[in-house]
């Protein structure tokens, strides 16, 4: 269902009126984690001012350590809904458990399945039945074929509104948290009709690499980027070192404008 054999052209996925697909370059930004209404609103306003048309923000955080901040859960979802009302930005947020799909879908415009859950087939089937578009991140140790098969699980449940997100894979290189597999973008586009965006924040884990990696994503023909922003990265409860501040975000927006997407 997700292959070019099934659908020859490239698809556009609409998220509450915002397109992600071949005719546009979609800029998604927001905090890694929802920490409070004030922090989320400030981050969303920064994102909007820089030209983002969708906001991200995690209410359920899949952390490597069980002792790390796990997110505000339903309270975080309510904050996201209220920030959408304040800013008009549709919300992309992660769901980590099939049992939470209904409540997350009540508040979110797009459901994110993160790298750690890419092969959680029960969750994939549940988001496939949610009626919401899905942002499916690549498993950090998954091949492209495995990732596309994960998308197939969602599509098989009747949901073809799936956007793929390359977010870096595990390699032997420790300079970045993961290695952004930029070649995944054209490889996926040759095989699948689904849109594909890039997450340089979670790939690199370092804010100084966000602009160059975003430029690479644009140059290679990605359909968008998703980046972390925080009004005060030093105090962030999650992934502060990769979060952009207003000035960095403006530099990124400029890079997005300067380098038009490939046709
Ligand atoms: C995220 O986007 O908040 C996240 C945790 O990303 P990933 O699943 O790619 O690590």
Image (spheres, rainbow, N blue to C red):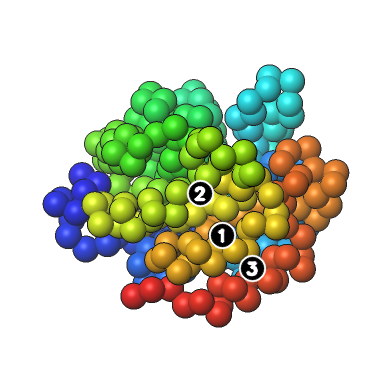
Q: Which residue is mark 1?
A: 213
Q: Quadrant of residue 249?
A: bottom right
Disc on res. 155 = none
* Looking at the image, residue 249 lies above or below residue 62: below
Query: Quadrant where the C terminus lies?
Result: bottom left
Crowdedness near tag 1: few (<14), some (14–19) or many (≥20) residues, C-alpha within 10 Å:
many
Are circles 2 and 1 on residues that touch, CB within 8 Å? yes
Instruction: Tell me which residue sits at (69%, 49%) in the image.
Output: 206
Which type of secondary structure does the marked residue at label 1 adopt? Answer: helix
Q: Is residue 239 visible?
A: yes
Q: Sequence-wise, which precedes: disc 1 or disc 3? A: 1
Q: Within 10 Å of the Cα at label 2, are there few (<14), some (14-19), or many (20+) other Cα atoms?
A: many
In the foreground, 30 or 175: 175
| Residue located beneath label 2 in the image | 180
Extreme-bottom residue of the structure: 258
Residue 240, relative to residue 54: is it above or below? Answer: above
Q: Residue at x 38, y 43 (%)?
A: 131
Q: Is residue 41 visible?
A: no
């Amino acid at each position: 269902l997700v292959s070019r054999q099934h659908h020859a052209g490239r698809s556009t996925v609409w998220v509450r009126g915002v397109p992600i697909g071949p005719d546009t370059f979609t800029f998604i930004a927001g905090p890694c984690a929802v920490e409070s209404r004030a922090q989320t609103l400030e981050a969303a306003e920064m994102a909007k001012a820089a030209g983002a048309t969708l906001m991200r923000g995690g209410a359920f955080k899949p952390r490597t350590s069980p002792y790390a901040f796990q997110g505000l859960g339903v309270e975080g979802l309510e904050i996201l809904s209220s920030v959408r009302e304040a800013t008009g930005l549709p919300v992309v947020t992660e769901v980590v458990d099939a049992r939470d799909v209904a409540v997350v879908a009540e508040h979110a415009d797009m459901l994110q399945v993160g790298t750690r859950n890419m092969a959680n087939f029960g969750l994939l089937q549940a988001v496939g039945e949610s009626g919401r578009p899905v942002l499916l991140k690549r498993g950090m140790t998954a091949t492209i074929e495995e990732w596309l098969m994960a998308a197939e699980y969602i599509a098989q449940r009747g949901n073809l509104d799936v956007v793929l997100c390359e977010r870096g894979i595990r390699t032997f290189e420790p300079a970045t948290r993961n290695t952004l597999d930029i070649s995944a973008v054209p490889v996926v586009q040759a095989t699948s009709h689904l849109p594909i965006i890039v997450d340089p924040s979670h790939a690199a884990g370092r804010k100084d690499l966000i602009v160059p990696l975003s430029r690479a994503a644009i140059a290679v023909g990605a359909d968008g980027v998703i980046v972390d922003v925080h009004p005060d990265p030093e105090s962030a409860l999650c992934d502060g070192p990769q979060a952009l501040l207003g000035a960095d975000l403006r530099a990124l927006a400029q890079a997005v404008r300067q380098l038009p997407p490939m046709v």
